Image (cartoon, rainbow, N blue to C red):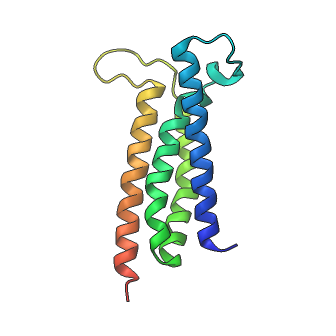
């Protein structure tokens, strides 16, 4: 499969994750009884939006770069995303309290920020290394 098609698939999945997060958040905010969304109490719902946004932000620059840069990022993403999800799932929903609470929401944003930062650093380094 062409690497541009793979990037578009990543983007589509990220948009779907953000859409699920937005619809669920609107249902919760408006306390709609007609919203029958069984996943709202599921831990999956907590991180769909931040992860989707980070995937979009880290994948968009790859559309304009060489395939070698994409392949290097893909290797990183194929390891980082499952490990991040595992870390999020293993974290308790609510932290211990205090200033440095390590609840699931905090870990989700921490992992998302780390993924985005490492992605950008990797993309910049590989783009600079493979330039003509």
Residue 34: x, y in percent? Answer: 69, 14
> In the figure, 92 relative to 120: above or below?
above
Q: Quadrant of the N terminus?
A: bottom right
Residue that appears at 51% across and 70% down? 70
Q: Quadrant of the C terminus?
A: bottom left
**Residue nearest the observer in this picture, 19 or 73:** 19
> In the figure, 91 relative to 69: above or below?
above
The answer to whether residue 82 is seen in the rendering is no
Query: In this view, which residue lies farthest toward the left?
Result: 99
Residue 98: x, y in percent? Answer: 31, 15
Residue that appears at 52% across and 22% down? 92
Compared across the picture, whether 107 is left or right of 12 comes to left
Compared across the picture, whether 94 is left or right of 31 comes to left
**Residue nearest the observer in this picture, 106 or 52:** 52
Residue 115: x, y in percent? Answer: 43, 50
> In the figure, 80 relative to 92: above or below?
below
The answer to whether residue 16 is seen in the rendering is yes
> In the figure, 116 relative to 1: above or below?
above
Residue that appears at 54% across and 22% down? 26
Instruction: Name which quarter of the figure residue 33 lies in.
Output: top right
Total numbered labels placed on residues in the image? 0
Residue that appears at 49% across and 52% down? 56
Instruction: Name which quarter of the figure residue 89 lies in.
Output: top right
Residue 62: x, y in percent? Answer: 47, 67
């Amino acid at each position: 499969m062409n690497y541009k098609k793979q990037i578009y698939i990543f983007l589509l999945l990220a948009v779907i994750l953000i859409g699920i997060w937005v619809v669920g958040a609107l249902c919760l905010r408006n306390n709609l009884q007609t919203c029958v969304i069984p996943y709202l109490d599921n831990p999956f719902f907590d991180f769909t939006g931040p992860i989707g946004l980070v995937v979009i932000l880290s994948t968009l620059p790859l559309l304009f770069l060489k395939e070698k840069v994409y392949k290097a990022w893909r290797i990183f993403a194929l390891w980082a995303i499952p490990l991040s999800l595992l870390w999020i799932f293993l974290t308790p929903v609510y932290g211990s309290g205090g200033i440095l609470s390590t609840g699931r929401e905090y870990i989700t944003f921490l992992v998302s920020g780390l993924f985005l930062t490492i992605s950008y650093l990797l993309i910049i380094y590989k783009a600079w290394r493979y330039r003509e």
